[in-house]
Amino acid sequence: MASFERFDDMCDNRLKPKILRNLLSDYVPNEKQPFVDFQSLSKVVSTISTHKLLSEDQKLQAKSKSAVDEWVERFLALVSSDMPDKSWVGIVLMGVTCQECSSDRFFSSYSVWFNSLLSHIKNPESSRIIRVTSCTSISDLLTRLSRFANTKKEAVSHAAKVILPIIKLMEEDSSEALWEGIVNLLSTIVILFPAAFHSSYDTVEEAIASKIFSAKTSSSLLKKLAHFLALLPKANKGDTASWSLMMQKLLISINVHLNNFFQGLEEETTGKKAMQRLAPPGRDAPLPLGGQNGILDDAAWNSEQLIVSRVSALMYCCSVMLTSSYKYKLNIPVASLVSLVERVLAVNGSLPKAMSPFMTGIQQELVCAELPTLHSSALELLRTTIKSIRSQLLPYAASVVRLVSSYFKKCLLPELRIKLYTITKTLLKSMGLGMAMQLANEVVSNASVDLDPKTVQGSDVVSSTNPRAVLKAGSKKRKQSTNTGVEAENAAFEVGVPHNHSLKIAALEALETLLTTGGALRSDSWRERVDKLLMMTAGNACEGRWANAETYHHLSNKSTADLVEFQVAALRAFLASLVSPSRARPAYLAEGLELFQTGKSEGEMKVAGFCAHALMSLEVVIHPRALPLDGLPSLGDQFPESNSLASLKHNTPNLNNGDNLFKEWTANVDVPSNNEILRNVDSISPLQEAKRLKRGNDLATVDSLSGQDHTDIVGSENVQQADVRKKVPESPKESLGHVSERDDMAPEEVYRQVVSETREGEGLAVKDSVMEEAVVVKKRESLDESDDDSIPSLKADDYLSSDSDIES
């Protein structure tokens, strides 16, 4: 009946025990069956990881536990097998089980599994592959064990048990595969359980240093050894003194190697000054790194390649130490690091006149062949130094700027110039605007040379007669006669995409960082050049050849991907040019919009995505929005029922309705008498008048008058105040005299008299003015009764008519 069991779907937990048993029966060998299909082991591992077959579901505890028990019994039997292939399979499956099994099973079994793996490392009869696999599985076991907070002491004890055996194995066996496995295990221990090295710190340091100085170590293994050596100070005491001691040892060892490598290429006092800076008089010099005194056998020193590889590894170790995190504040020897970089970059292979007789041409040739690698390592060390201390580089900023500027002038190799641009970006990001002022001209001048479309590396067509011909992909097919004519002009007509745009991309990124950091300088000395350069570069990179599969179907994927990266870098830098602050609107905004629109529709997916982002970013440049001023009352506060401007416009009454509108207003408005107006006018001071006019100009008020139809009226007080200022008479007494003649008249009679006197002259102008007077009078009374201090109170002049209006 079990064969007819149905499952809900592929995630049904009842499937897990069955799948695990199927893997055991089909792919995992037992003690009697031989193991012949090594590729099937990868299927077993991936299936276990995908379906979480060793998780032991609680709902199916019996079935799940029994299936996992069978699994554990099988790989333990394989681990103890005398056949190397079966033992190797069992060790691999044990490592997978350490990662995937349940917490309860791992906690109850990890000690047995660890001892089983350690026995294979200590066993002298174990094959090399068994030992390498055992180191990997122990690393998986210790990684899982570090997640249990209550087993820290046991974990440190287990980790300490494995250190000395693998160091001994490292000294006995010269296999790089075994060394790599041991270094990986040591790195795991120093990161997770640094206390395990307390009793064996010096032994481990000496063993690692001896492998770095060994002539049999490859460059890839050297890098891993240097990385572990950089982490080793955490295992000593983990304090500032341990870190500083290791850094001092590394710098001394590097300078000792350089003293031998630069013989005849620099002055003899240079090396002595470097050593004195690292070990000042009166202080005890530290022990050499790993017990070495810097003097190897003659055969080793005669190989310039080995010296450079060792120095590069030690510099990489310094870089890792600078960028790794530590619990304590570190004292970084910035002066020594900058001096070391300056010493390396000062040697370019040329012989001083005084040293020419002491170096042969062959020696100079060997040194010059290795100098680019050494310079690259020195530049990387400078970059990590800047990155680690950031703005604290300020006391040494002048030296660094001088070093970068001088090396830019003499550096011609693209790989080294890329490093220089990377250092420049790090400097600009770390130091900000001040560094941009110092490096702007240097970056712009060098980037202009590297982005020159006439250079062979960045051009699309190498032709002496037609250097600016480009490949117009996506356009109409050219006639055969046209191609024949071009080829007839020059037999060396080569069409294609450059293989490497790395230098141009680095230059574009440096210019982008310069605009981002120093665009606010608005410097006329270089800004116009940069804007034009980036516009031309983006246009040349994308014009007529948007990188897609149809355009360059004859090229490799790598070439197409390189072109896409170049186009994105050019467009990104061009966008930075358009949005960076400047004295005027961007000069090439139209070209940029056209380019981004075309790229959005025709470019490769990555290019099209960035072009869409660029158009969105340029929206604020094309249509700048005016932000609301602080302190203005919102319309929602004045009109809680209607917050939209459309509704306000719809509800605004027509102010030209004349008498009917006036009657509606005056029905609920008490117009003050003229005597009251005179008393209020006499109390106005010049200072109050100035304040009132300022408020009228700066603040737009919204007046709400309740009529029969509950109509909302929106008025702009600053417009009213402007009219009042124009109508203020030169002689206030004349205006007051005309007003006093109508003291005893009712407001309605005053209105009719004024209208009749002015109909022949000014028509409806005075009617509107008097209506505004009534509005302002009502507003004054409402504001006197209100406790809201956010709206300024109105004075008598707000509704005082001018003499010219009344007499006309």
Image (cartoon, rainbow, N blue to C red):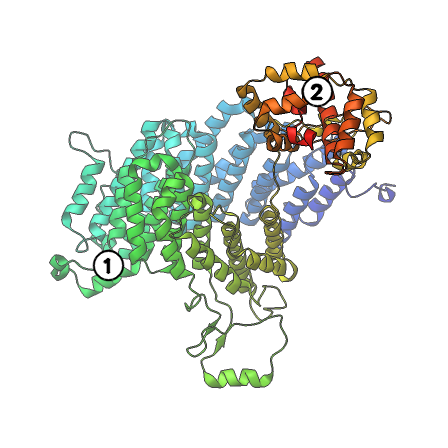
Is residue 316 among what the camera can see?
Answer: no
Residue shown at 74% from the left, 24% from the top: 774
> Depth check: 724 or 578 in front?
724
Vertical arrangement, residue 602 with respect to residue 399, above or below: below
Q: Could you tell me how many numbered marks the image carries?
A: 2
Vertical arrangement, residue 596 with respect to residue 397, above or below: below
Residue shown at 73% from the left, 28% from the top: 770
Residues at marks 1 and 2, CA–CA distance in whole angstroms: 106 Å
Screen quadrant of the C terminus: top right
Answer left or right for 573 relative to 357.
right
Residue designated by label 2: 741
Residue shown at 54% from the left, 45% from the top: 82
Residue designated by label 1: 349
> Depth check: 162 or 201 in front?
201
Q: In the image, residue 395 lies at what x, y percent?
A: 29, 36
Q: Judging from the image, what secondary structure is the residue with disc 2 in?
A: loop
Q: In the image, residue 36 lies at what x, y percent?
A: 62, 55
Q: In the image, residue 268 lies at what x, y percent?
A: 14, 49
Q: In the image, residue 412 lies at what x, y percent?
A: 33, 60
> Depth check: 404 or 696 in front?
696
- The kind of residue on which mark 2 rests is Glu
Answer left or right for 684 relative to 227.
right
